[in-house]
Image: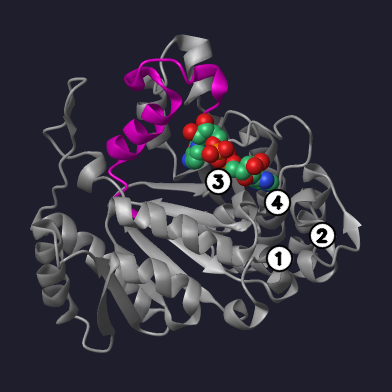
Amino acid sequence: MRSYKIALIKGDGIGPEIIDEAVKVLDAVSYAEGFEIKYDEFLLGGAAIDAVGEPAPKETLEGVKQADAILFGAIGGDKWDNLPRDKRPETGLLKLRKELEVFANLRPVTVYDELVNASTLKPSVIQGVDLVVVRELIGGIYFGQPRENNGERAYNTMVYTKSEIVRIAKVAFETAMKRSKRVCSVDKANVLDVSQLWRDTVEEVAKEYPEVTLTHMYVDNAAMQLIRDPKQFDVILTGNIFGDILSDEASMLSGSIGLLPSASIGEKYGLYEPIHGSAPDIAGQGIANPIATIASAAMMLRYALNEESAANRIESAIKQTLQDGYRTQDLSAFDAKEVCSTSEIGSIIANYASK
Ligand code: NAD
């Protein structure tokens, strides 16, 4: 029997609740498809600070490397907000991403037909939206040196090397080859030198993918176009900070941040996580939407374990659940036939996925 090892990082806030539902669904599909998943749990973020005094313990950074893939909930919360920056939960996540060299963050945005009314935009603008943001994750201004804040003057540095741009561009072109073969590279080449190198390098990589149509867009225009006409996009390729902002903007096309998954992929490791945070305001109430995490588990099956059929089962089960009118509280105003708890929605999806 095919057998896989998955590292689970539940994290803080709603993290444990949503990961438990993803495990429920994974167990159902692995049984149905005839493979086995074994889980190992690791601490990161606030939970790790409370247990061992640091946000990214060595045991986690090394231990997760033994797994075939990592499924991650969310970290952070008010309790740890006053710690120095290098001791905060978010630093733990940045360290983990860097340690695993997961340089490519893939965020698909799908608008479910059943939820076209859940978006703040008109249904005619968002119906049929199906795009992926491919964001560079471990370079750019979040990591560039030098950086300083001396109380009077502060700066960060946006750095990209050609090789960093080549590898993320290849992920975007490969992704486009499996979709409708269009890449829109987003930069600020009219102002930033680093963006000019980005643009020139993406042009070079594009020559290896003659079937893919490449366009370029300035980030300010891209922010506007995502709201004006999101259907024009297939794959959006961009750097770390622009991708951070645009992918959150794109997420709202779908109506709830609780719906969208992501995959962070490198040469060796893959980290699969919902795009939202630890939602401390609703933690422990059993009302969090676990769909983003369950959909992240589907991406994990597809990209890390090559279990395409199991991934499809999960994605169809999510659609069926929404079609049948089951909603968590965040979506209760949109054609809900029944408002369900986190655990109830997880069980419904697991049940559909196992058929
Ligand atoms: P958030 O994404 O946690 O929450 C924003 C809003 O969306 C909240 O009202 C929340 O209740 C709601 N929400 C989020 N996920 C939901 C879900 N699955 N179902 C229903 N509603 C959901 O962002 P925030 O409030 O800015 O941050 C809270 C904490 O999370 C902070 O400590 C922040 O640093 C951390 N954070 C962590 C990650 C991560 O772990 N990857 C990402 C972003 C923020």
Q: Which residue is mark 4?
A: 25
Look at the numbered discs 2 and 4 and tell me whether their residues touch, using CB distance below 8 Å: no
Q: Earlier in the sequence, mark 4 or mark 1?
A: 4
Horizontal side, residue 337 vs residue 94: left or right: right
Q: Which residue is mark 3?
A: 276
Q: Which residues are magenta?
A: 76-104
Horizontal side, residue 324 vs residue 222: left or right: right
Q: Which residue is mark 1?
A: 118
Residue 100 within the magenta-colored segment of the rendering = yes
- Cα distance in 3D space between marks 1 and 2: 8 Å
Q: Is mark 3 within 8 Å of ligand 1?
A: yes
Q: Nearer the viewer, residue 345 or 71?
A: 345
- Cα distance in 3D space between marks 4 and 1: 25 Å
Q: Earlier in the sequence, mark 3 or mark 4?
A: 4
Residue 158 x, y percent position in the rendering: 16, 47
- Cα distance in 3D space between marks 3 and 2: 20 Å
Look at the numbered discs 1 and 2 and tell me whether their residues touch, using CB distance below 8 Å: yes
Q: Which residue is mark 2?
A: 333
Mark 2 vs mark 4, foreground winner is 2
Q: Earlier in the sequence, mark 1 or mark 3?
A: 1
User: Is 73 above or below relative to 120?
Assistant: above
Q: Is mark 2 within 8 Å of ligand 1?
A: no
Secondary structure under the numbered disc 2 in the rendered image: loop
Residue 87 x, y percent position in the rendering: 37, 18
